[in-house]
Every structure is written in structure tokens, then in C-alpha cells.
Image (cartoon, rainbow, N blue to C red):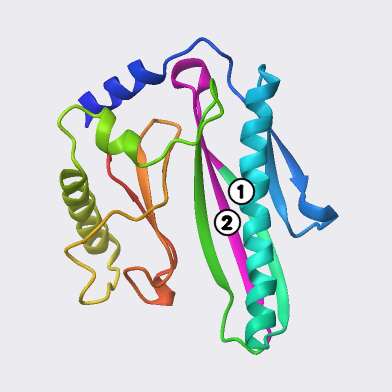
């Protein structure tokens, strides 16, 4: 994995300064918090922030559309965010983890998801799974899936988690991943993806 990180850093290296992250409220709603990114290049800044707003809007619109279609009553919607990596001075990677939660009245519990948005802050482009399966020397999707499978198994044993019987071995990579401050790659398993609700969202660091 070290060779992969070196290759990634060489590919996206730049001299720009780290992004500045501010907090804003979607439609002036105190429960809907999202990040606003500031970088030197205003065109890049706009591209990043448009993508963030689009994700928040997709979530909120989807909640109310689902309620209308199924006859639910929305009890609440909530968002928050965390910053994984913001080391733009070295690798121009900005990873944002946006937590989205909704509750329909009379439901047993809220539904919560974590969406990861990874940006190249020199271009404003979203970094997709291709960076993990194409940039790293010798890495292929199957090899990365196997590595994640091993790390998830180790986490299950270490934390005594219960997975669905059919969860392992993994058949594919989950779509949400991010880099942390040490440039470790994390994959996010949403609620019910591989385990019951009680297990919550499972975050696996494949570089630990």
C-alpha cells in the first residue's frame, strides 16, 4: 500500500495551500449543516462547493420525496460533517465525510448514512474509486477488495462485531471511501450493508 500512496502523491502533488473549511446551514435550517470550502482559485472553489450543495440537496429532496410517495411524516432531518484529509499543501486531497440522518414519525429508529466526498483541490474534481484501482502500481479492484475483506475480518474479531452470514467474503467495494489525516484510506459500510442496525456504520482503515 505504501507504493500506492507514493504514486498517488506524485500524481496529484501541487504547491497550493490547504483549503479553509467554513460551516453553513442549508436553507437557513440549523439542523442541516454543511461545509463551505475556500481555496485560492475561485473557479475551483465554486466547483467544489457546487458538488457539496448538490449532495445536501439530493439528500433533503430524497427524504421528502420518499415521505410523499409512501405516506410518511418527516420527524426530522439532520446533517453534519467531518474533515478526513485536508493536506492540500502536499497532496491536494480534501476528504469530507457528510453524515445524513432522517427520521420518519412512527419509525423504530432514524436512518443514517455517511457520504464521502473527495476533492482534488487544485482542480476541483471529485476523486473517484479509479484513483484507488488505477493509480496504485499493481493494484486491481479484486486485490483491493481482498485487502478490505481482510481488514474488515480483523475489525470484526477485534471489536466483536456481528456481520450478516453472507457478508464475507466481500463481493465488491463499497462506494464511499475517504483519506484521513495520515493519508490512510478508509471504506465506509452503511447501516445494513454488511451488519444489523445495531452495528451502526462501519469504518474500515485498510492502511492500519
The earlier-in-sequence mark between 2 and 1 is 1
Is residue 95 found left or right of 169 in the rendered image? right
Q: Residue furthest front?
A: 69
Q: Are marks 2 and 1 in contact (CB under 8 Å)?
A: yes
Q: The C terminus appears in which quarter of the rendering?
A: top left
Q: Which mark is residue 81?
A: 1
Q: From mark 2 to mark 1, how far is it between C-alphas?
A: 6 Å
Q: Which residues are magenta?
A: 83-105
Residue 118, image x and y in percent? 49, 38
Residue 96 forms part of the magenta stretch: yes
Tag 1 secondary structure: strand
Q: Quadrant of residue 32?
A: bottom right
Q: Which mark is residue 180?
A: none
Q: Rate crowding at label 2 as few (under 14), some (14 to 19) or many (20 or more) other CA atoms within 10 Å.
A: some
Residue at position x 66%, y 18% in the image: 41
Residue 97, image x and y in percent? 53, 47
Q: Quadrant of residue 108?
A: bottom right
Q: The N terminus appears in which quarter of the rendering?
A: top left
| Magenta stretch: helix, strand or loop mostly | strand
Q: Residue furthest right?
A: 28
Q: Which mark is residue 99?
A: 2
* Numbered label tally: 2
Amino acid at each position: 500500500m505504501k507504493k500506492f500512496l507514493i504514486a498517488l502523491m506524485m500524481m496529484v502533488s501541487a504547491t497550493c495551500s490547504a483549503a479553509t473549511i467554513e460551516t453553513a446551514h442549508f436553507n437557513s435550517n440549523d439542523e442541516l449543516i454543511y461545509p463551505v470550502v475556500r481555496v485560492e482559485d475561485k473557479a475551483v472553489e465554486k466547483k467544489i462547493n457546487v458538488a457539496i450543495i448538490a449532495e445536501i440537496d439530493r439528500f433533503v429532496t430524497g427524504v421528502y420525496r420518499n415521505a410523499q410517495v409512501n405516506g410518511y411524516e418527516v420527524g426530522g432531518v439532520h446533517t453534519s460533517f467531518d474533515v478526513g484529509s485536508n493536506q492540500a499543501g502536499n497532496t491536494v486531497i480534501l476528504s469530507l465525510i457528510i453524515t445524513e440522518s432522517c427520521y420518519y414519525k412512527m419509525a423504530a429508529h432514524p436512518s443514517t448514512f455517511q457520504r464521502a466526498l473527495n476533492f482534488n483541490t487544485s482542480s476541483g474534481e471529485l476523486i473517484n474509486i479509479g484513483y484507488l484501482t488505477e493509480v496504485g502500481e499493481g493494484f486491481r479492484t479484486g486485490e483491493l477488495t481482498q485487502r478490505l475483506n481482510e481488514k474488515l475480518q480483523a475489525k470484526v474479531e477485534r471489536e466483536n462485531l456481528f456481520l450478516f452470514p453472507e457478508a464475507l467474503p466481500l463481493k465488491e467495494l463499497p462506494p464511499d471511501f475517504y483519506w484521513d489525516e495520515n493519508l490512510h484510506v478508509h471504506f465506509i459500510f452503511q447501516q445494513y450493508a454488511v451488519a444489523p442496525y445495531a452495528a451502526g456504520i462501519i469504518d474500515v482503515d485498510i492502511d492500519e
